[in-house]
Amino acid sequence: MAELKIKYSNEDYTLLENGQIGIADFLNKVLPIVPEDILNPDNDLINLLLSYHSDDGGAVTVTKAELGQVVYDLSKKTGKITFKYHLAYHYACSYSEKDYEKNDKVDFSIDTMTNTVVLTFLDVNTRSTAEEF
């Protein structure tokens, strides 16, 4: 399993804890999925999503990313996120391009001791299509 840890601010978590924002709004504040972030080649979240498609051939990039459904258990501070993202494939030899929309579910937890959201990704070689649905 690959884990990605992303820090969050106390202020953002307080808004969630007090019910001023929902879990999806909290994660949108914390996760690097706005357009400027997805263009960053050092974005670990986008790179992990791309790793599932690196063997597909062609040059692949993420052109858009957003949160889909988010399920969260407040008492356990764990949940599941559906990432919705668009992949653009460029095939230089055939001068062709293809676009696909993908949905991947990722487990997450919120560690309030370290102010960290922990995303848990399945390893590329153990990932199963059945686990995506």
Image: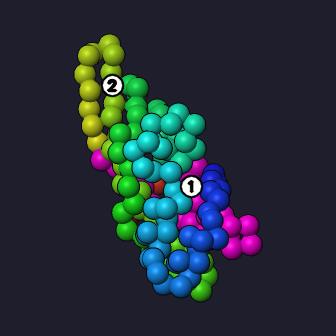
Q: Is residue 126 visible?
A: no
User: On the rendered image, what quadrant is the N terminus found in?
Assistant: bottom right
Q: In the image, is residue 12 part of the stretch drawn in magenta?
A: no
**Residue at 33%, 34% in the rendered image:** 88
**Residue at 60%, 71% in the rendered image:** 11
Secondary structure state at the residue bearing disc 2 = strand
Type of amino acid under label 2: His
- Judging depth in this view, the residue of 133 and 118 nearest the camera is 118
- Judging depth in this view, the residue of 21 and 51 nearest the camera is 21
- Judging depth in this view, the residue of 74 and 133 nearest the camera is 74
How is colour applied across the structure in the image?
Answer: rainbow
Q: Which residue matches tag 2?
A: 90
Range shown magenta: 101-124
Considering only vertical position in the picture, is 56 above or below 92? below
Q: Is residue 87 left or right of residue 21?
A: left
Residue 33: x and y in percent read 45, 51
Q: Pointer 1: residues within 10 angstroms few (<14), some, or many (20+)?
A: some
Q: Which mark is residue 21?
A: none
Considering only vertical position in the picture, is 68 above or below 50? below
User: On the rendered image, what quadrant is the C terminus found in?
Assistant: bottom left
Secondary structure state at the residue bearing disc 1 = strand
**Residue at 46%, 32% in the rendered image:** 55
Q: Which residue matches tag 1?
A: 121
The image quadrant that residue 76 belongs to is bottom right
Q: In the image, is residue 106 part of the stretch drawn in magenta?
A: yes
Residue 85: x and y in percent read 36, 49
Q: Is residue 68 visible?
A: yes
